[in-house]
Amino acid sequence: MEYGMDGNRLVINLTGKIDAGNAPDVEDQINEILGTTGATDVVLDASELEYISSAGLRVMVKLLKRLSSLIVVEASPSVYEVFEMTGFTQMMEVRRALRTIDVAGCECIGRGGNGAVYRLDAETIVKVYHNDTNSLEKVQASRVSAQKLMAYGIPVAIAFDVVKVVGGEGLGYGLVYELLDCKTVGELIHEDPSSAEKWAHEAAALLKLLHTTEVPEGTFPDARDSGHQWVEVAKDVLSKEDQARLHRLYDSLPAKNTLVHGDFHTGNMMVQGGEIVLIDTDDVAQGDPIIDMAGLALTFEYITTDDRAMDTLRMTVDEMHRYYDALLKDYYGTDDEALLQRYAYQRKLHSLVKLLYGLVKTDAVPEPMKSQVIAQMRGGLLQLMNAMGI
């Protein structure tokens, strides 16, 4: 019986059939593995399990009593049916095997830090998540977050299927959305640059709706945790003193029960029936809007070439700036230059923290260039921190 560790979880691969003839042997093998590893958080991979009888289910009952967590994943339809008909899906988490889709040859209509969006056909798209940074649990959490957001009146696209994806960049898990003839905001602006201000106005209204919609405490994660995570991931390129300063900064952000999307850019904004609907909701939190504003700055203030802008946002740099400038003006609703400059400094500061986090985490940037860019960004961050008295 093969097994391995996935973080703190023990993953055991079940194969063939588990019935009265071999259930005792299977139980003994599992117990031996548990004794060797000391694990109490266990995932049983049923992708190669053809059949399980009542004798096999009794093994599950014993494991449930013994372990702190037991999950069965990748169950075939026939195996899942056994668990469901016997009531085991009410006792423990059992996940069906995910269907696999191939995006080779599909149009990529946007990409960002978490992955890429492909158009499957005229009616459906799939958001594919980078496999190295996004677990299945995180992808499934995005689906749940979307359902919660819809309940609070936020226009979101509901994913109807979690899938495995092959054949494209950022291969891993994906969410399939049904969106009839949808396009991203970036695509529409590129088709008609004169519409940039119109879509900026719509996007600003949606952003303000998010930032003024209150939800009960604990509905979504605390947005301050995002900032703390940025600092923790980037800690190896920051001094202990600067880490402490930044952690104090995120501790000092006000606790709010208003919404934060976490990745509010045009690639995550699909237009359906003339209305913007959001996708990629796995980073939704509640808290200070600066977390969203930092993400906006990171998306729109660091892209300098048309190739990169078209690849990421599906519009040129000029179109991107036209949209972004109009969005900020509409969102802030002020012409006070001093206030706007203060907002700009705040966006820049937090975006640099998030940028350091992304640079440290990524393997896409060659190491010599990565070290050079990190040094430049860190220098800019420290200058801003000092200038703002942080």
Image: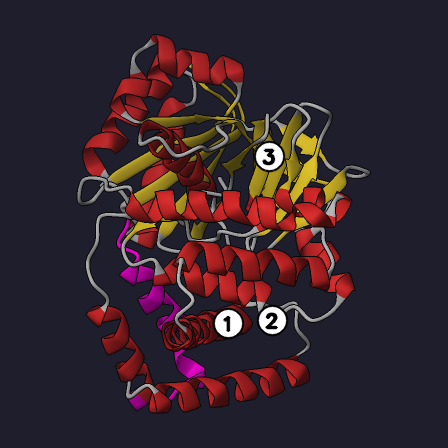
Q: Residue 33: x and y, percent?
A: 37, 46
Tell me the amino acid under the disc marked 2.
Tyr
The number of numbered discs placed on residues in the rendered structure image is: 3
Q: Mark 1, mark 3: which one is toward the viewer?
A: 3
Q: CA distance from mark 1 to mark 3?
A: 28 Å
Residue 74 in percent (x, y) is at 50, 29
Q: Which residues are magenta?
A: 221-241
Assess disc 3: are there few (<14), some (14-19) or many (≥20) residues with their C-alpha within 10 Å of its C-alpha: many
Residue type beneath disc 3: Val
- The numbered mark, 2 or 3, whose residue comes first in the sequence reads 3
Q: How far across and how far down the image is residue 160, in percent?
A: 51, 24
Q: Residue at x 42, y 48 (%)?
A: 207
Q: Is residue 284 visible?
A: no
**SS category of the residue bearing label 2:** loop
Mark 2 closeness class: few <14, some 14–19, many ≥20 residues within 10 Å:
few
In front: label 1 or label 2: 2
285 or 18, which lies in front? Answer: 285
- Considering the numbered disc 1 on the image, is that residue within a helix, a strand or a loop? helix
Q: Are marks 1 and 2 in contact (CB under 8 Å)?
A: yes
Relative to 137, residue 292 above or below: below
Indicate whether residue 331 is drawn in magenta. Answer: no
Q: Which residue is mark 1?
A: 355
The residue lying at 49 percent from left, 51 percent from top is 264
Residue at the image point whose x is 31% and y is 25% from the top: 59
Compute the Cα span from label 2 to label 3: 25 Å
Of marks 1 and 3, which one's residue comes earlier in the chain?
3
Q: Residues within 10 Å of mark 1 (few under 14, many from 20)?
A: many
**Position of residue 98 in the picture relative to residue 84 (left or right):** right
Which residue lies under the disc numbered 3?
A: 271
